[in-house]
Image: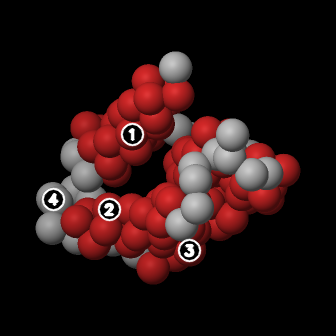
């Protein structure tokens, strides 16, 4: 059972990478992801939410030993790599602020799922 859950997690990472490194979301962004009345871009909330979900899901899967830290490092580097790739894609821009927003999502995901992260893998 656990292997298929890890496959779902990896699929989520891959889908998020594709969404961040293609132009398709840019074309629908204004229609689907407007600016919130409070002035917070909904797209940035999506960034935080996606990385928080991936971090919390990985915590729920309770990776063993050093894999815990490697998974978190992978998520942090995923944010950096996708932003770097966006710099080479027409209609996309790369931003250090977006990297920080992605990293905030990872941190929030770990905080929310901390009991899973600190529990000994079974």
Q: CA distance from mark 3 to mark 2?
A: 13 Å
Q: Which residue is labeled 2 in the image? A: 82
Report the residue that reaches farthest toward the bottom: 96
Of badges 3 and 4, the one in the foreground is 3
N-terminal of the pair, mark 3 or mark 2, is 2
Residue at 16 percent of width and 60 percent of height: 89
Helix, strand or loop status at disc 1: helix
Residue 10's label in the rendered image is: 1
Helix, strand or loop status at disc 4: loop
Report the residue that reaches farthest toward the right: 115
Q: CA distance from mark 1 to mark 2?
A: 15 Å
Quick one: 2 or 54, which is closer to the camera?
A: 2
Find residue 27 and report its horizontal and vertical position in percent: 29, 39
Residue at 79 percent of width and 51 percent of height: 119
Q: CA distance from mark 3 to mark 4?
A: 22 Å
Q: Is residue 66 left or right of residue 56?
A: left
N-terminal of the pair, mark 1 or mark 3, is 1
Find residue 51 and report its horizontal and vertical position in percent: 56, 52
Find residue 99 and report its horizontal and vertical position in percent: 48, 71
Residue at 26 percent of width and 63 percent of height: 86
Find residue 41 and report its horizontal and vertical position in percent: 60, 53
N-terminal of the pair, mark 1 or mark 2, is 1
Helix, strand or loop status at disc 2: helix
Q: Residues within 10 Å of mark 3 (few under 14, many from 20)?
A: some
Q: Which residue is labeled 4 in the image? A: 90
Quick one: 91 or 63, which is closer to the camera?
A: 63
N-terminal of the pair, mark 3 or mark 4, is 4
């Amino acid at each position: 059972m656990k292997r298929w859950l890890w496959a779902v997690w990896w699929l989520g990472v891959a889908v998020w990478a594709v969404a961040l490194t293609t132009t398709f979301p840019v074309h629908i962004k204004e229609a689907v992801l407007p600016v919130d009345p409070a002035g917070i871009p909904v797209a940035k909330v999506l960034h935080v939410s996606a990385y928080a979900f991936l971090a919390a899901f990985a915590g729920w899967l309770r990776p063993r030993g050093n894999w815990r830290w490697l998974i978190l490092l992978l998520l942090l580097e995923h944010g950096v790599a996708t932003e770097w790739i966006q710099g080479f894609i027409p209609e996309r821009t790369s931003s250090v602020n977006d990297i920080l927003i992605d990293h905030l999502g990872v941190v929030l995901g770990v905080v929310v799922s901390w009991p899973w992260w600190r529990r000994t893998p079974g």
